[in-house]
Amino acid sequence: MNENINAKNEIILTAANITKSYGGSVVLNDVSISIKKGKVLTFVGENGAGKSTLINILSGLVAQDSGSITYEGSEVRWSSPAHALKNGIAVVHQELTLFKNLTVAENIFAGNKSVIKFGKLDRKFMAQRSSEILSKLGLHIDVNTLVENLTVAQQQLVEIAKAISWNPKLLILDEATSALDTMQVENLFKYCRELLQEDIAMVFVSHRTPEMFEIADEALVIKDGNVVGFYPELKAVTDEDLINCMVGYSIQTSFPKKNQSETRPPIMEVENLSTDFIKEVSMYIRPGEIIGLGGLRGHGQEELLRTLFGLEKVRSGKITIDGKPYTVKDVSRAISEKFAYVPPDRKKEGAVLSLPIENNLTIPVLGQVSNALGWLNRASEESMIDRTRKRLSIDQRNWHQTVAQLSGGNQQKIVIGKWLESDFKILLMDEPTRGVDVATKHEIYLFLRELTKQGLSVLLVSTDMLELIGISDRIYVFYEGRIHKELTGDDITEENVTYAIMGLQGDKT
Ligand SMILES: Nc1ncnc2c1ncn2[C@@H]1O[C@H](COP(=O)(O)OP(=O)(O)O)[C@@H](O)[C@H]1O
Ligand SMILES: [Mg+2]
């Protein structure tokens, strides 16, 4: 008994001062954690907080930029996930990685040399051990079944069984329960508790808070790559505390005040617009409005922006701007109709920068952005850049770096900045804050509100729920190429948007 208690407090892995950046944006900043035998540690944080990146570093899939990992008492540098796995760290990722045309047992033991006996697979052992693990997970299937014949939930259980088959000392589940139903999760937890009795250590990450509270002993709260909280006794914490710590700000305070009383006639009206991608879309936008276009990606909202900007062909329907018909032709026509467009993937700089500009520009250094901007007003180039920089508070120290070296936030400012001096009336933006740090996000929101105060309109595609509901005066939710729902005022809630995104009507509105 005593032995057990001691083992439970023993640290199996310590990560110290882990830092990781991707393309100039810091994804993990000085993160330190320790993982204990016989305990479950959970990572809590919004999408993009850095949970999976941390897991990928602990398990050898990704190398940290700085910081160290100590495992079973010695400092380690994993050369690959296989290296970490051989040493007892098994991870189940959210994405399924199974070979569809192999059997369940073959999948569970794929890559595991311990089942090769005299140069052959020990199929009897494989079948026995696979069945044993799977039945503990509540899955009673013939392990000679091909994986392609399993449901997604069953496949997820096979992934978990595969990790367990390595007899890991540290088992990491990264949103590995998303396809499982309550019963399956209960079975999994029962099995996990047995394993914990045997002093394996666990990291468990889940979108479902109740699951987390049920299985985890300790919680590390991560926000934008920083550790913002640690709860050594999760059971003593309420979910409200946890969420407050995780979000760190409420929707009301992080977004500028909305404009819900706009009554000026629409600057743009779209009637029954159809393209190859969208069907009979009708909507309008008034001067001074921020309109959010919601939906899962690929449901048509991004095509509406592209069509308005002359990047897609119209099949039928009508668009009027300031009461006059607008015939979609190409980008120059769109610009002359006073559209500006910020595309979703600012990494494809060339494309981004070439869009509004006749001569295709690639801007290797910011010093040359001035040339890119010069098309707008070469005479007052310098003062214009200065204004842009001030309006967007782009850090002057970055001025001579390449764009690629800038943080995601500053890159985005450059992309937006290009348009500032042009004379647009409707700003089309596709995921303007993706990969942007939280402080810059806030600046971008303030800036968009500024624009609307000058009577400009913003049409914004976002899959970030908080952003969509936090910034939009009205929301059109797309589903399968059509506008499925329009939400205004107090009906703009996470619940209503979620309903609509799934193509459901919902009786909440
Ligand atoms: N391979 C990668 N290249 C570039 N950016 C990445 C990569 N992996 C993750 N990121 C970025 O790192 C941030 C953290 O992502 P992730 O660790 O997956 O978060 P979480 O698991 O908490 O949702 C996100 O902004 C994501 O876009
Ligand atoms: Mg993740």
Image (spheres, rainbow, N blue to C red):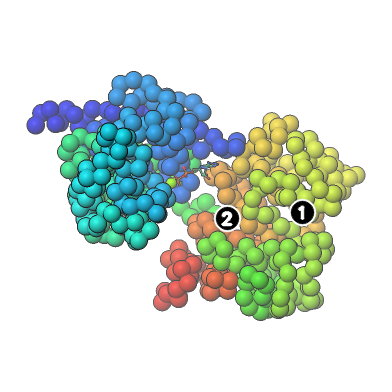
Q: Is mark 1 within 8 Å of ligand 1?
A: no
Depth-wise, is mark 2 or mark 1 nearer the camera? 1
| Number of numbered callouts drawn | 2
The answer to whether residue 224 is seen in the rendering is yes
Against 187, is 33 above or below? above
Q: Is mark 2 within 8 Å of ligand 1?
A: no
Per the image, the residue denoted by label 2 is 256
> Crowding near pointer 1: few (<14 within 10 Å), some, many (20+)?
many
**Residue 297 — which label?**
none
**In the picture provided, is 288 more to the left or to the right than 335?**
left
Q: Is residue 34 visible?
A: no
Q: Position of residue 220 (x, y in %)?
A: 35, 39
Circle 1 — which element? Answer: loop
Left or right of 325, for residue 233? left
Q: Quadrant of the C terminus?
A: bottom left
Q: Amino acid at mark 2?
A: Pro
With respect to residue 377, does 453 lie above or below? below
User: How packed is label 2: few (under 14 Cα within 10 Å), some, or many (20 or more)?
Assistant: some
Between marks 2 and 1, how big is the CA–CA gap?
30 Å
Q: At numbered mark 2, what does the secondary structure look like: helix, strand or loop?
A: loop
Front-most of residues 165 and 209: 165
Task: Tell me which residue sits at (49%, 26%) in the image.
Answer: 66
Residue 302: x, y in percent?
62, 62
Tell me which corner region of the image, top left, top right, bottom left or bottom right, holds residue 402: top right
> Which residue is drawn at the image coordinates 90% and 44% (left, top)?
379
Task: Tell me the number on the disc at residue 355.
Answer: 1
**Residue type, mark 1 in image:** Leu
Does residue 303 sit above or below 22 in this rendering? below
Point out residue 201 in the picture as x, y percentages from the top left corner: 26, 36
Please name whichever residue, 29 or 101, is drawn nearer the observer in this view of the structure. 101
Q: Quadrant of the N terminus?
A: top left
Q: Earlier in the sequence, mark 2 or mark 1?
A: 2
